[in-house]
Image: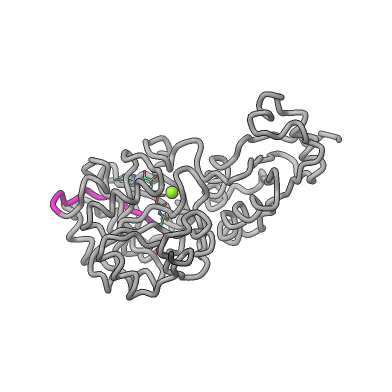
Amino acid sequence: MSAPNPYVNTDQAVKALQSGELVAIPTETVYGLAAAIDNPLALQQIFKLKERPLYDPLIVHISDLTMLESLVVNIKHYPALMTLAKHFWPGPLTLVFQKNQSTVSDLITSGQDTVAIRIPQHPVTLELIKKLGVAVAAPSANPFKKTSPTSAKLVGQYFPDLKILDGGHSQVGIESTIIRQIESHSVEILRPGMITPEDIKRIPGWNYEIKMNLNTQGPGSMLEHYQPLKPLFLIKGNDISSEQALKLLQMNMEVSFLQKLNLHKRLHALKINELKLDADPFISARMLYRQLMELSETSDIIFINWSLNNTQDAWLSILNRVEKAATKIIFAPPEFTF
Ligand code: TXA
Ligand code: MG
């Protein structure tokens, strides 16, 4: 029997991918669960291991723009996307193009005629893709609906037998922004991330409208997603302490809801911990998932105090993840006394 989690180097990862195995790869956003895009059995294995439904398409990771040309068609019809690619790649941005039917399989795109692609900003993974000479499809390296891992260690907690290429802690910390071009003059954000509308509008000469569309299909847009192993409560409106949070939960929760969470009998004895965000949204994004996973080990309940002053685009991307990860959102009125 092999020891849990064989950590591999880049050459070993290349060999594993060539022989149809999956490898966890580091990216600047979160770790990915990678398969070579020319290996249908390996692509199927991604869905099996993650218990992910086949209707949820995968993101293709490439190392340079030459690879892009072989995967998409009608590239000239996407000037806005090419402007974004030139400006933000390598980086935490995924762009949706019309796919080349002969190089991108339906397994990757769930039968759609578009493909989501990005060049990740991580030297280890860029080297891996270059050496492999083939793009890799990689969703986040977590079981379906769970929190995405931002370190090799966290990947190992989910998948103890998986080969892992360790590239340190993910520097961005939440998944890439996903954008598609809908008309000749506008683009649509399908999943917000740390590349924000504010960043895009700063591109010199940018003259496309930016719309938000967070209602398309796919788990990235589902209500329950990114869930930690313990219940997470999002408190808005008033910063409160652990003791106050517990009282507020008691007052807000129906017994049946607490029973479902297996909590109500020993509510007074619960270990409740606050996930404290930083004043800087970029630091908050970097630590969000790691803290959710680490606090899940030491707490029965986790809560986050959300400042209503955090209205910057980068904060709204973080709020998007926190709201989906939350078991419940509770408003603590400012005049509330405990
Ligand atoms: O930062 C990231 O994007 C990470 C790292 C590993 O690169 N990957 C990631 O993959 O978050 P995943 O599978 O967890 O989320 C991919 C999202 C899904 O919500 C899927 O619906 C959407 O991308 N997607 C994939 N192909 C698409 C397409 N052709 N059109 C629209 N959305 C697409
Ligand atoms: Mg995911």
Magenta segment boundaries in residue numbering: 91-102
Furthest-front residue in view?
1
Relative horizontal placement of residue 334, taking residue 44 as reference (left or right)? right
| Closer to the camera in the image, 263 or 177 | 263
Assign the C terminus to one quadrant of the image.
top right
Relative horizontal placement of residue 89, taking residue 294 as reference (left or right)? left
Check the image and report above or below for 241 versus 29.
above
For image coordinates 56% across by 56% down, the residue present is: 285
Residue 31 painted magenta = no
Quarter assignment of residue 201: bottom left
| Closer to the camera in the image, 135 or 284 | 135
Check the image and report above or below for 198 versus 211.
below
Furthest-right residue in view?
338
For image coordinates 78% across by 45% down, the residue present is: 242
The image's colouring method is one colour
Relative horizontal placement of residue 76, taking residue 1 as reference (left or right)? left
Quarter assignment of residue 249: top right
For image coordinates 29% across by 46% down, the residue present is: 181
Residue 175: image x %, image y %? Answer: 46, 54
Assign the N terminus to one quadrant of the image.
bottom left
Q: How many marks?
A: 0
Residue 337: image x %, image y %? Answer: 85, 35
Residue 123: image x %, image y %? Answer: 39, 73
Residue 260: image x %, image y %? Answer: 63, 29
Relative horizontal placement of residue 108, taking residue 90 as reference (left or right)? left
